Image (cartoon, helix red, strand yellow):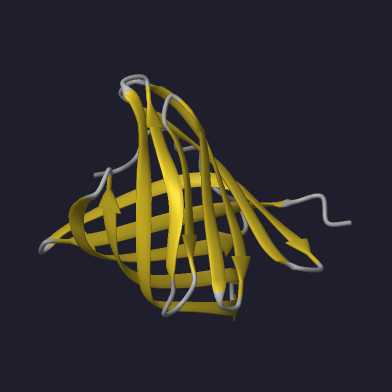
Amino acid sequence: MDSGRPVRIELATVADGRQEAFMYTGFLYRRPEGWYVRYDEEQDDGRVSTILKVQPNRVVLLRRGARSMEQVFVPGAVTSGTFSTPYGRFALTTHTRTVDVAETEDPPGLVIRIAYAWTLGGEPMGERRLTVMIKEGEARPCTQPNR
């Protein structure tokens, strides 16, 4: 069983022409069913623990803490999830256009690209592109996202 390897996680989103980038440190785990990535985020309202379950054509995003979320990405599918804050719980619907997962060798890691549209509480939230680069190796400490 893989005990996890330290990684650096570079996450970039593009939504409504606006781009944001974040950097985290975490751990990458190899399991028979795919990859797991675990990292913590410091949000304005508290800490959030994030897990990405990664398979070739399916990615599940789980967040627990000050904000909780479950979002599933399957190419061509519409999936249901939830988004919870201290102010309430909302239904989340994701229409995934594409999921691309590639392993990298130098340095070892993963590149995940997802394009999707989503609604929150029945309200359209627009189109979004998400790119997550996970690089194995010495990761420098980073508890705050870089914006």
From this view, report whether residue 90 is shown above or below residue 77. Answer: above
Q: Nearer the viewer, residue 82 or 47?
A: 82
Q: Quadrant of the C terminus?
A: top left
Q: Position of residue 4 (x, y in %)?
A: 75, 51
Quarter of the rendering occupied by the N terminus: bottom right
User: Residue 60 lies in what quarter of the image?
Assistant: bottom right
Relative to 107, 75 lies left or right: left
Q: Is residue 110 visible?
A: yes
Q: Residue at x 28, y 47 (%)?
A: 120
Along the viewing direction, whichever of 118 and 98 lies nearer the viewer = 118
Q: Give percent across and percent down for residue 3.
A: 82, 50
- Check the image and report above or below for 113 versus 119: below
Q: Give the left or right position of residue 43, taking residue 108 as reference.
A: left
How many marks are shown on the rendered structure? 0
Determine if residue 105 is in view. Answer: no
Relative depth, front residue between 93 and 68: 93
Q: Which residue is rendered at x = 40% and y = 32% of the image?
A: 84
Q: Which corner quadrant of the image does residue 56 belong to?
A: bottom right
| Residue farthest along the front direction in this orientation | 122
The image position of residue 11, as x and y in percent, is 38, 56
User: Which residue sits at x=44%, y=55%?
Assistant: 80
Q: Position of residue 110 (x, y in %)?
A: 56, 70
Toward the left, the furthest residue is 17
In the displayed structure, 8 sits above or below 16; it is above
